[in-house]
Image (cartoon, rainbow, N blue to C red):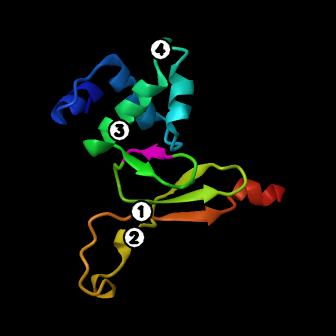
């Protein structure tokens, strides 16, 4: 679905900036921070402010088009929740990776003791394959 149409379906006015931020997230699955997004889009949108990036991300999270990843204490990262998956954060290079076949929703219902899970975020920490080779 086209980004402009998707934003309209979620009652978000599809300004050039909002479309650009969402499309950046969709095409750069590196779980960027707001600062990363601002740095990447500023050359093509010179009037883009950090405040606009933060406000747009807040709106996209509020409308559930984007989720936050709390993999670091000092900053949030962002992801498009298009399918259930866990994450892996490399302690050395700081990259965040998707783990496609790992997700808390795979927990059998009988292990939940009657609890109903509405949201689950799972992050593993360690060394990615590249950093293991240089360690």
Q: CA distance from mark 2 to mark 1?
A: 7 Å
SS under mark 1: loop
- Asked if residue 64 is positioned above or below residue 10 in the image, the reply reads below
Question: Local crowd at mark 4 within 10 Å, few (<14), some, or many (≥20)?
Answer: few
First along the sequence among labels 1 and 4: 4
Q: Quadrant of the C terminus?
A: bottom right
Q: Nearer the viewer, residue 114 or 27?
A: 114
- Asked if residue 35 is positioned above or below residue 98 in the image, the reply reads above
First along the sequence among labels 4 and 3: 4
Q: CA distance from mark 1 to mark 3?
A: 18 Å
First along the sequence among labels 2 and 1: 2
Label at residue 121 = 1
- Asked if residue 63 is positioned above or below residue 46 in the image, the reply reads below
Q: What's the residue at 42%, 49% (across, down)?
A: 68
The location of residue 132, given as percent across then percent down, is 76, 60
Left or right of 24, for residue 110: left
The residue that disc 4 covers is 45
Q: Nearer the viewer, residue 111 or 39?
A: 39
Residue 99 visible to an observer of this rendering: yes
Residue range of the region highlighted in magenta in the rendering: 76-80
Cβ–Cβ below 8 Å for labels 4 and 3?
no
Cβ–Cβ below 8 Å for labels 2 and 1?
yes
């Amino acid at each position: 679905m086209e980004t402009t149409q998707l934003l309209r379906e979620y009652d978000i006015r599809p300004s050039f900036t909002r479309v650009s931020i969402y499309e950046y997230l969709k095409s750069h699955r590196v779980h960027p921070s707001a600062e990363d997004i601002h740095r990447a889009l500023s050359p093509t949108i010179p009037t883009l402010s950090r405040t606009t990036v933060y406000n747009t991300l807040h709106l996209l999270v509020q409308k559930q088009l984007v989720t936050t990843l709390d993999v670091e204490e000092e900053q949030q990262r962002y992801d498009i929740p298009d399918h259930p998956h866990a994450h892996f954060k490399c302690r050395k290079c700081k990259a965040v990776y998707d783990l496609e076949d790992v997700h808390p929703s795979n927990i059998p219902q009988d292990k939940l003791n009657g609890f109903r899970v509405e949201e689950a975020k799972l992050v593993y920490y360690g060394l990615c394959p590249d950093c293991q080779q240089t360690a």
